[in-house]
Image (cartoon, rainbow, N blue to C red):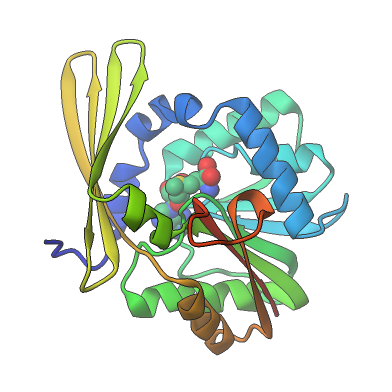
Amino acid sequence: MIDKMSNPRSELETHFNEDYLHFSDVVHPPEANDRATEAICELLSLRPGSSVLELGCGYGRITNRLAEKGVQVTGVDISPILLEKAELDAAERRVNVEYVLGDMRSLPWRDRFDSVFMWFTTFGYFDEADNERVLHEAASSLRKGGRLLIDQDNRLAFLRERWPTCSVVQRNDDLRIHVMSYDALTDRGNIQRIAVRNGRVRRTELSIRYYGFTEYCSMLRRAGFQTVEAYGQEGAEFTLSSPRLVVVAYK
Ligand SMILES: C[S@@+](CC[C@H](N)C(=O)[O-])C[C@H]1O[C@@H](n2cnc3c(N)ncnc32)[C@H](O)[C@@H]1O
């Protein structure tokens, strides 16, 4: 039974920390990052010069690749450790990205971007009101006709195939264990992360609200979007068994 209905800001910062970074290359190898970048360009029709905002950009694995394609990218994240890594990687790649330490629930831009996106389960960390607030902030940041993309787990496939479950990622002798459960009454998943590094064990928890496509449609229309489309992983057709649900909404 899950009692958490949201993650306090301090817990989000603690979860997306040095341990998250330590296992990131194993979870997201470079080829997967390249593929994801291509899919985002396609779904958002990005061109050199397009202006794009990534909410929850993490360590810049997508933002820096988009910048290499000539896209003007801004990345917002709540984790100083991940942003520092993003900036280092941007410098190594000799690309220019505007990185901003901030909270996706309160954004400073109005009618500015051609596209906004949240990639790899970056939506649903808050209670219902704050999750909708993120969508309103994204809408306000977009110019008229701009697109919002959200890439989440497809809960239909997840529930059939993977919950409750446990996954292990190994890097040398270090382990990252995710113990996952799902609450049928709240449609929230709870991920307990156990990181074992150099024999030391650290635990954090993350609660995520998993929305279905019809729920996205209602929320996105309330946030001011005109049309909403559904895709599967990296832009494939969306079906019951798609591992991902990718939502694209037009302002
Ligand atoms: C699952 S990670 C995905 C990171 C990145 N999109 C990627 O695909 O590598 C979620 C990201 O959201 C960030 N995040 C969590 N809460 C946030 C908030 N309130 N505002 C901005 N970023 C947040 C985390 O620090 C983390 O980098």
Specify whether residue 163 is in view.
yes
The image quadrant that residue 144 belongs to is: bottom right
Q: Quadrant of the N terminus?
A: bottom left
The image quadrant that residue 23 belongs to is: top left
Q: Position of residue 185 (x, y in %)?
A: 20, 73
**Identity of the residue drawn at 59% across and 51% down:** 233
**Identity of the residue drawn at 26% across and 32% down:** 177
Q: Position of residue 136 (x, y in %)?
A: 54, 79
**In the rendered image, the vertical position of residue 224 relative to residue 57, given as above or below:** below
**Identity of the residue drawn at 70% across and 80% down:** 251
The extreme top residue here reads 172
Q: Position of residue 55 (x, y in %)?
A: 55, 57
The image quadrant that residue 95 belongs to is: top right
**Identity of the residue drawn at 17% across and 15% down:** 199
Front in this rendered view, residue 197 or 28: 28
Q: Residue 197 vs residue 244: left or right?
A: left
Q: Position of residue 13 (x, y in %)?
A: 34, 48
Front in this rendered view, residue 192 or 83: 192
Q: Residue 120 vs residue 117: left or right?
A: left
**In the rendered image, the vertical position of residue 93 relative to residue 199, given as above or below:** below
**In the rendered image, the vertical position of residue 244 relative to residue 28, given as above or below:** below
**In the rendered image, the vertical position of residue 249 relative to residue 202, given as above or below:** below
Specify whether residue 78 is in view.
no
Q: Residue 136 vs residue 127: left or right?
A: right
Front in this rendered view, residue 85 or 29: 29
